[in-house]
Image (tube, rainbow, N blue to C red):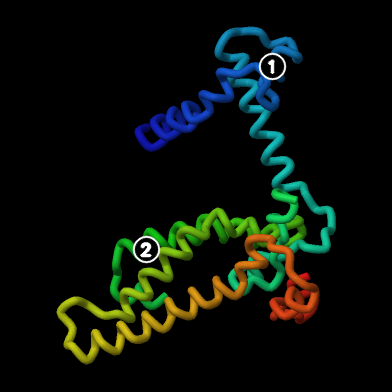
Amino acid sequence: MTFIAVPLAVYIASWSGWFATSTGYYRDYAQTHGVHTPVISALYSLWEYHLQAVGFGLGLASPHHYQSQPWDWLLVTRPVAFYAQCYTGPWLLHRDWRAGAVLLGVLAGWGPWFPLVSRTKFYYYALEFEPFLILSVVLCLGLILGPAAAGVLRRSAGAGLVGAYVLCVLLMFWYFYPILAAKIISYQDWWSHIWYRIGNGWI
């Protein structure tokens, strides 16, 4: 009961802003369909809201030039230029519970998309589990760095590899910043940043 009633109550409470307004999406669905009972009316509208959301999530199948499949997301073979539109495992061997929790977060956000092959999907859907991917990288870097009790040579080698990786990340961020920040650059400069050109590629 605790694992059902408490999470459900917390989830419904998270919609308090929607309940408090009369202009939220589908907020007046119940009233327009003849249901005026206090509380029941609001919950009925919320239920219909969720049915619409699930129906859209499962039913969207319109082809799109920038759509991609979940197995493409980690390789970033088909990103989406949504910024311009808006602004004109090894650790399993150690049985570390933190790694298990991170892996569960990745699988929970990524796995459900695999069966929906015909559903139109985009790269930015991966943003929902991106924090767990970052934590995965951090855990891997920790393994490379080595335990605090390791010898000086082991820690030094690990620190060198981790430092080299972080430096590469910073250099890549610096190089791609004009694209990420939607800066105005020449076509030639822009094209030089388009590294992946197989199939539809990045454009």
Query: Which amino acid, mark 2?
Result: Gly
* Left or right, residue 78 beside residue 155: right
* Left or right, residue 37 beside residue 32: left
**Disc assigned to residue 60:** none
State the image coordinates of residue 50 (x, y, percent, origin top left).
64, 33
State the image coordinates of residue 161 (x, y, percent, origin top left).
37, 85
* Left or right, residue 163 beside residue 37: left
Q: Nearer the viewer, residue 25 or 86?
A: 86
> What residue is pinned by disc 2?
100
Which of the two discs, 2 and 1, labels the residue nearer the N terminus? 1
Residue at 60 percent across and 18 percent down: it is 21
Q: Is residue 44 above or below residue 98?
A: above
Q: What is the distance, in whole Å, between disc 2 and disc 1 at their CAs?
A: 42 Å
State the image coordinates of residue 115 (x, y, percent, origin top left).
66, 60
Q: How many marks?
A: 2
User: Label 2's element?
Assistant: helix
- Kindly indicate the quadrant of the structure image that contains residue 177: bottom right
Residue at 55 percent across and 72 percent down: it is 174
> What residue is pinned by disc 1?
30
